[in-house]
Image (spheres, helix red, strand yellow):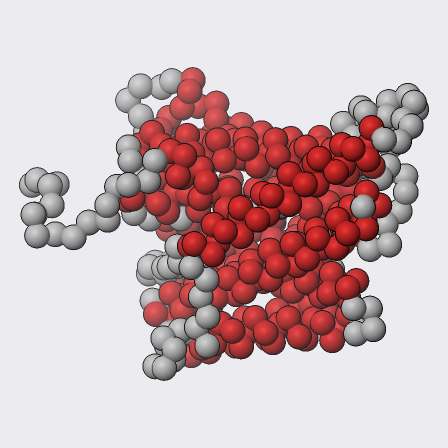
Amino acid sequence: MSNEASPSSTRLKRTLTLWDLILYGVIVIQPVAPMSVFGVLSERGRGHVVTALLIAMVAMLFTGISYGRMARAYPSAGSAFTYVAQEIHPSAGFVTGWSMVMDYMLNPLICTIWCAGQANAFAPGVPIWAWKVFFAVVFTMLNIRGVKTSARINTAMAAFMGAVVVVVIVASARYIFGHPHDAPGFFTHPFYNPSLFNTKALFGATSIAVLTYIGFDGISTLSEEAENPRRNIMYATVLTCVVIGVLSAVEVYLAQVIWPATQPFANVDTAYVEIMGRVLPILGVVVGATLLLANFGSGMGAQLGAARLLYGMGRSNALPKSFFGAVDPKHHIPRNNVLFVGAIVLTGSFLMSYGRGAELLNFGALIAFMGVNAAAFLRYFVRAKEKTVWNLIPPVLGFLICLGLWLNLSKPAIIAGSIWMTTGILFGIWKTRGFREPLSFEVPAE
């Protein structure tokens, strides 16, 4: 039977070049990605933020290769749980999907926490708890009304963030060279400071640094619109990781030189803003406003993404269909799910810190990454007719590095994440009668 579509069939047009895909990846991840989490990384890694980000980049490069390869096999799916379910086992796919549910729920939560902290810095007269309520409610109300940002707005925002990054780099360099710095190791301590270095602390920070790269896998969802997807999806995923990794390393290196790790922050969640305020007071305000806007947009979009994921699960009867599978007839959005996620975000923002939320998010992300690497290993090495080193090394190293980072998450994050995963697995066993019946997830495209 021919695989050619009939002339009357409708297809997406393949217009996206390699550079279009890379630009999309950078926009999704955001060029200011490491700024929000800088203080948490510095505190956890004892000042070795640059090294942590570069190690995380290596892990994401190998994982990016696996994502790119799996996108060849499943060009219209673009989701970790599909790759794992098809290549390993449906039950393993369910576990991967459940870890993704946690990610989708935690993303708007940590954005709410960060926005509340920065808003409190701008307007300290309003208590931080009030800002948490404000942002959780605003995200929910805007999503209920179906507010949606266009691709043009997202591109313009990315361009603006890129301009801010350029200003930050130039202003930071001027500040550094305008102040005396004759101390030994002044320029190398951000990479390695013998008086503070600790291997466990470094890998603990690296396990959080993965957050900087979250979103690169979204490139695989564009397989049907990309020119030469068999080549360009993998190249774009890998190159996006490199671009974000190098840019992030430069941003945090300058910050670490300006503010040595031995000096405490007033608030670790907004530490980068505090550092830029030392460079130039107005720059601190600009960076704070930029990150507030970036986290606001990310949080609002993430909440709707979580609601859509729950809707997909409800529609497929993985969750109670009458509640999670319902669509508001006026605004055509899963209203119940938006409210449900909003309630979790509001509650969680009072029970969790930004750093702990980031670690929990990475708990789920690293499970998904390990699953994709394992799926790529099975498909392109174990089941392949020809066993090549190229098909062996990237998925194996990607899996092992992600496993190492996952094991270096903090004990509270591992305990909380394990409780979530255990609950999901027990639910899956009950719902599918021991995984004898299918239970699907539908992950929305970004």
Q: Residue at x 78, y 68 (%)?
A: 123
Residue at position x 68%, y 62% in the image: 115
* Residue 391, image x, y percentages: 40, 24
> In the picture, which quadrant includes the N terminus?
top left
Q: Quadrant of residue 295?
A: bottom right
- Asked if residue 138 shows in the view, the reply is yes
- On-image quarter of the C terminus: bottom left
Q: Residue at x 47, y 50 (%)?
A: 155
| 59 sits left or right of 153 in the view | right
Q: Is residue 247 above or below residue 212?
A: above
Camera-nearest residue between 404 and 121: 121
Q: Position of residue 412 (x, y in %)?
A: 73, 54
Q: How many marks?
A: 0
Q: Residue at x 36, y 19 (%)?
A: 387
Residue 72 appearing in the image: no
In the foreground, 182 or 29: 182
